[in-house]
Amino acid sequence: MVVVMDDEQRYRAVRGRDSRFDGVFYTAVRTTGIYCRPSCPAVTPRRENVRFYRTAAAAQESGFRACKRCRPDTVPGSPSGTCAPTWWDGRSG
Ligand SMILES: [Zn+2]
């Protein structure tokens, strides 16, 4: 399923802490230099301070660091299959 969202819809998902969008996009907060999953339990940042990224890597490349609460740098079992789960390497399970 391809969902086309504009930033307004993304921001609404973040305000609702909608976990359905985990892995779909990431929110980066200009004022803190942190990026999050949409479902992050932290206080929703102001709209004008938020930027959206398609991948955690893109946010990271822009200089943002992963949030310690929602851990957006780990794969949430996303079925989108954009990249191989290399973090499974060397693990039996
Ligand atoms: Zn977070």
Image (spheres, rainbow, N blue to C red):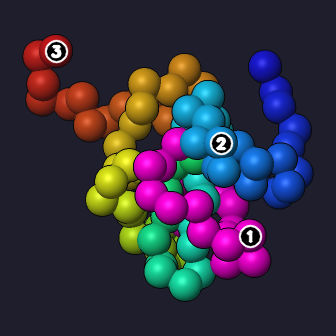
Marks 2/3: CA–CA distance: 33 Å
Residues at marks 1 and 3, CA–CA distance in whole angstroms: 40 Å
Which residue is identified by label 3? 93
In front: 83, or 47?
A: 47
Q: Looking at this view, is 5 or 45 the one in front?
A: 45
Residue 13 in picture, x, y percent from top left? 70, 43
Please report the bounds of the magenta region as a residue range.
Answer: 39-59
Q: Residue, x 76% and y 48% (percent of image)?
A: 12
- The residue drawn where x is 24% and y is 29% is 88
Is there any visible trace of residue 42 in the rendered image? yes
Q: Count residues near mark 3 (Cα–Cα under 10 Å), then give few for <14, some for 14-19, many for 20+.
A: few
Point out residue 18 in the picture as x, y percentages from the top left corner: 62, 36
SS for callout 2? loop
* Mark in front: 1 vs 3: 1
Q: Position of residue 3 (x, y in %)?
A: 83, 31
The numbered disc on residue 77 is none
- Residue wearing tag 1: 47
Q: Would you say 83 lies left or right of 9 here?
A: left
User: Within 8 Å of ligand 1, the CB of disc 1?
Assistant: no
Tag 1, which secondary structure? helix
**Which callout, 1 or 3, points at the residue further toward the start of the chain?**
1
| Residue 82 visible | no
Instruction: In the displayed orientation, state which residue is furthest to the bottom.
Output: 31
Identify the residue position indicated by label 2 in the image.
16
